[in-house]
Image (cartoon, rainbow, N blue to C red):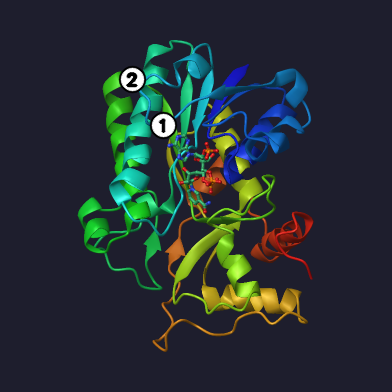
Amino acid sequence: KVVCVTGASGFIASWIVKFLLQRGYTVRGTLRDPSNPKKVDHLLKLDGAKERLQLFKADLLEEGSFDSAIEGCDGVFHTASPVRFVVNDPQVELIDPALKGTLNVLKSCARSPSVKRVILTSSVSAVKFSSRPITPEVVVDETWFSDPDFCRESELWYTLSKTLAEAAAWKFVNENNIDMVVINPSMVVGPLLQPEINESVEPILNLINGVPFPNNAFGWLDVKDVADAHILAYEIASANGRYCLAERVVHYSEIARILRDLYPTIQISDKCVNDEPYVPPYQLSKEKANSLGVKFTPLEVSLKETVESFREKNILDF
Ligand code: NDP
């Protein structure tokens, strides 16, 4: 079968491409600049890439840009979306590419009758940010949907971009009779296939470099498990709706503690950015993810593999 992965060179997408090739699929990967070796070399080296990986140039903001990559595909994995937590112009840098880009990709899917299912990479960002109080007792699940006004008021621009994109996607697929399954991962760590660091593993590098950690609790999980979940959501006919993913929800101080246990000789940061009480972890339901057969790698293993991968890529030398 032929499938398309948008933003193929990204952290998560590269693992999706790798696993799809391993499973015998022909993969069409889209990226903005297929002539950039930093974006493509790691993909071209994957097992099966020579025979079954085709790269297409496509930009989220260009109408019709994804038509040729998607035409004739059985499945489409839409992962491309800017991941940046600090921006100057949220509309231009995050919201337009996320929202217009998602609709652009879905319009190409609607024009291609071969497409049987779309897997959208959304985020827990599109799930848990609303005025609903979050306490340690609360279990966040797939029935929650982030509130765009809350995101705007809190200036959570990346969160807003993912919320608007997922909401628009559901509206579009319902109106156009497209089968879509959505994956909502928490913070993703684990080994990098791409040569350069991405936003969600950067906090780990910061901790190793002794930078004080944010006073916040997030869900965390392994990139390989995220990729697996995408493929399960595509291959299992009964998969439906959204799937929240996290191995564990922990405060940054706990990530620092795990890293200190793993690397006792390194000066891992033990300072929080402020003196306020630690934001307590919440709970994220794993029920739906478990029902899909998603397995979660222990966070300790994922963090170790993240750090080892920094070493391999010469992002860190110690
Ligand atoms: P990366 O930054 O590694 O990858 C993002 C991809 O989006 C890149 O391949 C990039 O393409 C593409 N992209 C960005 N802007 C555009 C544009 N204007 N046109 C075309 N492509 C564009 O991020 P991740 O792998 O971490 O994230 C992948 C997806 O997973 C995103 O949708 C993200 O929101 C979601 N996600 C990530 C989480 C995480 O913790 N990492 C958690 C939850 C969800 P190019 O190669 O051309 O630059």
From the viewer's perspective, is 316 left or right of 114? right
What residue lies at 38% left-to-right and 13% top-to-bottom? 111
From the viewer's perspective, is 145 left or right of 213? left
What residue lies at 36% left-to-right and 72% top-to-bottom? 135
Q: Residues within 10 Å of mark 2 (few under 14, many from 20)?
A: few
Q: Is residue 135 visible?
A: yes
What residue lies at 24% left-to-right and 57% top-to-bottom? 152
Q: Is the residue 173 above or below the residue 241 in the image?
A: above
Q: Amino acid at mark 2?
A: Asn
Q: How many marks?
A: 2
Observer-side mark, 2 or 1, equals 1
* CB atoms of marks 2 and 1 within 8 Å: no
Disc 1 within 8 angstroms of ligand 1 (CB): yes
Q: Residues within 10 Å of mark 1 (few under 14, many from 20)?
A: many
Instruction: For mark 2, give the secondary structure.
Output: loop
What residue lies at 69% left-to-right and 79% top-to-bottom? 260
Q: Which residue is mark 1?
A: 60
Label 2, label 1: how many angstroms apart (C-alpha)? 22 Å
Q: Quadrant of residue 14?
A: top right
Q: Is residue 294 visible?
A: no
Q: Quadrant of the C terminus?
A: bottom right
Q: Which residue is mark 2?
A: 177
Q: Amino acid at mark 1?
A: Leu
